[in-house]
Amino acid sequence: MVAEAERRFGPVELLVNAAGAVHRAPLTATSDADFERVLGVNLKGTFLCTRAVLPGMIERRRGRIVNLAAMAGRIGAPRLAAYCASKWGVVGLTKACAEELRPAGISVFAVCPGSVDTESYRAAIPGAKPRSTPESVADVIVWLGSEAPAATTGSVVDAPG
């Protein structure tokens, strides 16, 4: 994926890890497969994509990575154990990567949106009224990916809406 993106567009200067999966059910009704699928997409996917762009970023001694976590991963939410665990893991991965990659000139951030008006949010929590728009979260991502001072690497930005 990274090789194809770089062939088409040039070196990856910014990676936004934004894929997400949700499983909404009581913990007792969450199967191993459900738990592993959510962690696979949300946490392992973030790890794999980050690892894939690092050789080029390290070689160029610059780059930015913005990971989408979630407020639910910071405060918890009922019936979302796998999702909360995965997004808490994204925060930890962000912090670890920021410390490891700081000497290479690579900044790593996480954004923790609250409820965002997306199809997946409406499907996961029918009838709920989201507080944010995708555009408002994108504004935070753009700022972190371009203007945030390098000294803020490792920051986790709450965007509850």
Image: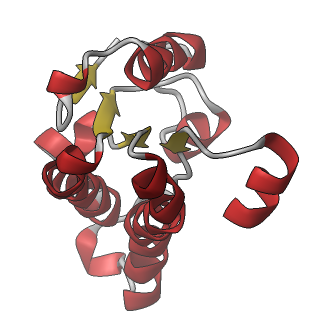
Q: Residue at x 68, y 61 (%)?
A: 2
Image position, residue 152 (x, y; %): 17, 24
**Count of labels in the image:** 0
Residue extending furthest toward the right: 8
Which colour scheme appears in the figure?
Answer: secondary structure
Can residue 98 be spotted in the picture? no
Image position, residue 98 (x, y; %): 20, 47
Residue extending furthest toward the bottom: 32
* Position of the C terminus by quadrant: top left
Can residue 16 be spotted in the picture? yes
Q: Between residue 4 and residue 22, name the one nearer to us.
A: 4
Image position, residue 142 (x, y; %): 50, 17
Q: Residue at x 58, y 12 (%)?
A: 135
Q: Is residue 136 above or below residue 70?
A: above
Q: Is residue 132 above or below residue 117?
A: above
Q: Residue at x 29, y 36 (%)?
A: 109
Q: Does residue 47 appear to the left or right of 93 in the view shown?
A: right
Q: Between residue 83 and residue 51, name the one nearer to us.
A: 51
* Position of the N terminus by quadrant: bottom right
Q: Residue at x 24, y 52 (%)?
A: 101
Q: Is residue 27 above or below residue 2?
A: below
Image position, residue 97 (x, y; %): 23, 55
Q: Does residue 96 appear to the left or right of 71 in the view shown?
A: left
Q: Does residue 5 appear to the left or right of 136 in the view shown?
A: right
